[in-house]
Image (tube, rainbow, N blue to C red):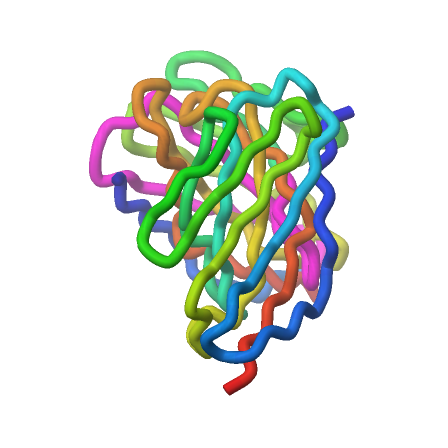
Amino acid sequence: QKEVEQNSGPLSVPEGAIASLNCTYSDRGSQSFFWYRQYSGKSPELIMFIYSNGDKEDGRFTAQLNKASQYVSLLIRDSQPSDSATYLCASNVGGGADGLTFGKGTHLIIQP
Amino acid sequence: SAVISQKPSRDICQRGTSLTIQCQVDSQVTMMFWYRQQPGQSLTLIATANQGSEATYESGFVIDKFPISRPNLTFSTLTVSNMSPEDSSIYLCSGGDSGANVLTFGAGSRLTVL
């Protein structure tokens, strides 16, 4: 059974601080990991994907993967009120060629 | 990344009827996927739409309830058959390629079944 676990939150972070979002997964066969942002009433928007152990940075976002611990995280630096959304962690085996298993999402609130 | 268009964007349907959702991609993609997002929940994969062959369904989803077509590499449809209020949900289409790392989503189709 493939499962992706996230704390549903809400996670409240002051503006300008670092928001840390965490995710664990059960399927050791998972190879690809994705972070999506979803605003209320909108479809998910891909923020980052990561395949290799370690860190991957893109602007204010850093994804971290530890396959040994089956743990993925997303750090958002200099958090802005516009970052307030639900963040969905997802995994699959085959990258773009495979459907995704999603976590329930973490509701992030950035307080001005 | 591919741009995905879905229609209808929303609909209100009567119990027992069926509705077909269309998904159009602006470029050829190897894989297309259909997801359901029930109110307040995350996304659940319904099936993978395979071009030229039957769709591959996830556990808990069956072809009779959710027939899928994939006539070419840019288009797919999902039909929600014999609808009940429990089918009220957002249905989302996604596409991707084995060579591309990005899986983008359509805007979704919000179904309300009365």
Q: Is residue A1 left or right of residue B105?
A: right
**Vertical side of A44 occupied by B56: above or below:** above
User: Can you give x and y, in whole percent of width and height, for residue A106 in the image?
Assistant: 65, 59
- Corner quadrant of residue A25: top right
Q: Determine if the magenta segment contains residue B20.
A: yes
Observer-nearest residue: B61 or A23? A23
Q: In the image, what residue occupies the spot 21% across and 33% down?
A: B27
> Residue furthest toward the bottom?
A112
User: Can you give x and y, in whole percent of width and height, for residue A38 in the image?
Assistant: 50, 60
Start-end of magenta stretch: B15-44
User: Can you give x and y, in whole percent of width and height, for residue A70 in the image?
Assistant: 68, 29
> Residue furthest toward the left?
B27
Q: Determine if the magenta segment contains residue B17.
A: yes
Q: In the image, what residue occupies the spot 50% across and 87% down?
A: A112
Q: In the image, what residue occupies the spot 59% across and 57% down?
A: A20
**Vertical side of B37 occupied by B23: above or below:** above
Observer-nearest residue: A108 or B30? A108
Q: In the image, what residue occupies the spot 57% across and 66% down?
A: B12
> Residue furthest toward the top?
B53
Observer-nearest residue: A45 or A50? A50
Image quarter where the C terminus of chain B lies is bottom right
User: Can you give x and y, in whole percent of width and height, for residue A2 in the image?
Assistant: 72, 27
Count of numbered marks: 0
Image quarter where the N terminus of chain B lies is top left
